[in-house]
Image (spheres, helix red, strand yellow):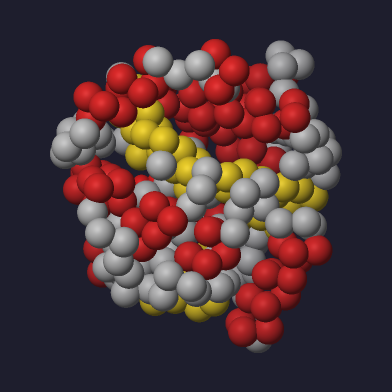
Amino acid sequence: MEVIIKRDAQEVSLEAAAIFRRQLQEKPDSVLGLATGSTPVALYRRLVAMTQEGDLDLSHATTFNLDEYVGLPGSHPHGYAAFMRQNLFDHVKVARWWIPDGMTNDIPQHCAAYEQAITDAGGIDLQLLGLGSDGHIGFNEPGSSLGSRTRLKTLTMQTVAANAQYFASPAEVPRHVMTMGVGTILEARRCLVLAFGEGKAKAVAAMVEGPVTAMAPASALQMHAVCTLIVDEAAASLLQRKEYYRWIYENKPAWQRA
Ligand code: F6R
């Protein structure tokens, strides 16, 4: 796993935006896996600015979001469809975007169809991920099968509490979600994980330097051949091999840079 440590969230987002730009230059019709939550907001803002400046073209790209709350319609202000429109799709044109339908009345069938749509699109080229403070990726909470596919999951109390900031009260946070599985995520050709702040430091250390375990689903990314993690200083604070990661980055050959 490649670990890049940047000074702050802004620098992390700039580096991530450069990776998106390179991906789209190399393959304009890339299939992108996208995330929601607070982590990617600055990156999406940067992608919008780059598009407006003529520096990025997403118009041939297809996107698949990782997850959606069960029971929230696409129009719900706190649903992830609304989040994506507000942060990205109202501002940049993509060829097609997919997000699980929180109002489906057949969850298993809908999740299987979502997997099939990813396969039909040719698989995900670049998967963006945030990291839960309990080590989740997508909404694969601790204990999730590392081979799991898109399916229904129940959020942990920790995740409900973390996401309550977006709702009027914790009681309004849906308990259930549909999420790509860990196995689905691992099939992406490249994974890009972003994490900021002290609150993510334990999860970052478990992901990078802990054992591969379902108790820290992000640790499954140690099995991925092309995974980049970009963190700020605070999120990197518990990494034991910080100085080595910095050394690798400083000595990176020019052709490998985004
Ligand atoms: C969101 C998602 C989640 C978040 C994670 C971190 O689509 O899949 O895994 O990335 O909960 O959330 P934030 O970024 O709000 O800290």
The residue at 41%/75% (across/down) is: 145
The residue at 75%/29% (across/down) is: 26
Q: Is residue 212 left or right of residue 14?
A: left
| Res 255 seen here | yes
Q: Is residue 128 left or right of residue 213?
A: right
The residue at 35%/39% (across/down) is: 195
- Please provide percent x and percent y for residue 220: 39, 59
The residue at 30%/22% (across/down) is: 246
Q: Is residue 210 left or right of residue 258?
A: left
Residue 230 picture quarter: top left
Looking at the figure, which quarter contains the C terminus?
A: top right
| Res 71 seen here | no
- Please provide percent x and percent y for residue 20: 62, 31
Q: Nearer the viewer, residue 80 or 156?
A: 156
- Please provide percent x and percent y for residue 45: 56, 28
Looking at the figure, which quarter contains the N terminus?
A: top left
What is the count of numbered marks?
Answer: 0
Q: Is residue 143 depicted above or below 194 in this figure? A: below
Q: Nearer the viewer, residue 38 or 65?
A: 65
Q: Nearer the viewer, residue 73 or 97?
A: 97
- Please provide percent x and percent y for residue 224: 48, 52
Residue 232 picture quarter: top left
Q: Is residue 58 depicted above or below 247 in this figure? A: below
